[in-house]
Amino acid sequence: MLSLFVSTPSTPSNLLTNSSPDVTPHPSDPDLTYELQLKGSGRTPFSRSADGLAVLRSSIREYLCSEAMQALNIPTTRALSLISLPALPVIREREETGCVLTRVAPSFIRIGCFEAFNGPTNMFFFGGGQQKPDLEGLRILGEWVASKVLKLNIEPGKAWGKELILDVARRNAKMVAGWQAYGFMHGVINTDK
């Protein structure tokens, strides 16, 4: 499933700046969608203070771990392609080779997507707190995630919050239990949604 492409100096520079996810319906089932996400394609409004770049070393490790988790039946995203960018030096603890990792999953919605609509007020921190709460946006996102992403059986117009939270908690607990059963530890759950 992994394809590796090494860029050349003639590789279009827009490859490094296009990070918008695409939602692609499955050809035989329009209710089944896949989203594509680019990691390492550059800064976005959500990059906080980071440079938005990825390094080849850790992206290869991410690919190998995601395939191992898939084989162990632990929920994970999948790597679709890994593009090495040897002409793009990335500074971390040392200079490393840049890359762009394309991930594919049914959804890349994160808990932080909900937090962005109802972030803390009178507070500033990297990645949140800069926007005013938008409860109508939160409602729209929640109803869409409950029906289209999680496919919860909730009647239109009925309360969805409790069911959504319980389903997300169950899914996250199952995923983290799978991690721990095989000795994988990570400090945050946002590695996979």
Image: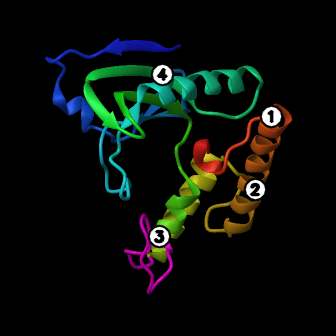
According to the picture, the residue beneath numbered tag 4 turns out to be 80
Residue 123 within the segment the image draws in magenta: yes
CA–CA distance between discs 4 and 2? 27 Å
Badge number at residue 117: 3
Residue 14 picture quarter: top left
Give the magenta-colored segment's residue range. Answer: 117-133
| Label 2 crowd bin: few (<14), some (14–19), many (20+), radius 10 Å | few
CA–CA distance between discs 2 and 1? 21 Å
CA–CA distance between discs 2 and 3? 20 Å
CA–CA distance between discs 1 and 3? 35 Å
Q: Of marks 2 and 1, which one's residue comes earlier in the chain?
A: 2
Q: Of marks 1 and 3, which one's residue comes earlier in the chain?
A: 3
Q: Which of 182 and 108 is in front in this view?
A: 182
Horizontal relation, residue 166 to residue 55: left or right: right
Dot 1 falls on a residue whose secondary structure is loop
According to the picture, the residue beneath numbered tag 1 turns out to be 183
